[in-house]
Image (cartoon, rainbow, N blue to C red):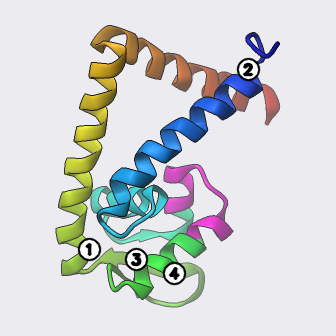
Amino acid sequence: MFDDCIYFNLATLSRQITKIWNDEFAVLGLAPSHGYVLAALTENPDASQKALSEIMELDASTITRFIDALANKKLIEKNGIGKGARYTITPEGQALSQQIYKRMGRLYADMQSTFGKRSFSNFVTGLRAAKQTLQEAYQ
């Protein structure tokens, strides 16, 4: 009945992927979203909330929640106040970020193994293209 429904198939796939990622990141005491914000800060040191919001393609309020959670765990620090605030990773956050990258690499390899290298690459490329097409069509 729902075989041709993009919403149903993507939502189902998203739940399956989310479970796999949640299980993998739980070992680190983080949700995947928090891990990806930490990774974004690793690659963009001293980033602002707005910059993180753009990188992660999330609303500012969502990024604020993630930043607060990471700051409460002493993984990042806020430098400055208000809109000029920047965020940096603490030494504890740096150490954890290395583990995050290892887990992300393992998940990537697992997905390549599960789907096949070429199929996985084509799938991710297709997802990015579909995302871009919808952003252009509905913004």
Q: Mark 3 points at which residue?
A: 87
User: Which marked residue is nearer to the observer: mark 4 or mark 3?
Assistant: 4
Q: Which residues fall within the magenta stretch?
A: 52-63
Q: Earlier in the sequence, mark 3 or mark 1?
A: 3
User: Which marked residue is nearer to the observer: mark 2 or mark 3?
Assistant: 2
Q: Can residue 72 be seen in this view?
A: yes
Q: Is mark 1 on a helix, strand or loop?
A: helix
C-alpha span from label 4 to label 2: 34 Å
Three-letter code, disc 4: Asp
Check the image and report above or below for 68 versus 99: below
Q: Earlier in the sequence, mark 2 or mark 3?
A: 2
Three-letter code, disc 2: Ile
C-alpha span from label 4 to label 1: 14 Å
Check the image and report above or below for 67 versus 27: below
C-alpha span from label 4 to label 3: 11 Å
Q: Label 2 crowding class (10 Å Cα cut-off): few <14, some 14-19, many 20+?
A: few
Q: Which of marks 4 and 3 is nearer the N terminus?
A: 4
Q: Quadrant of residue 132?
A: top right
Q: Can residue 40 be seen in this view?
A: no
Residue at x 82%, y 12% (from the top left corner): 1
Q: Mark 2 points at which residue?
A: 6
Checking the image for residue 68, the label placed there is: 4
Q: Mark 1 points at which residue?
A: 93
Residue at x 30%, y 65% (from the top left corner): 28
Three-letter code, disc 1: Gly
C-alpha span from label 3 to label 1: 12 Å
Residue at x 34%, y 51% (from the top left corner): 24
C-alpha span from label 2 to label 3: 37 Å
Q: In this view, does 65 lie to the left or right of 123?
A: right
Check the image and report above or below for 20 versus 129: below
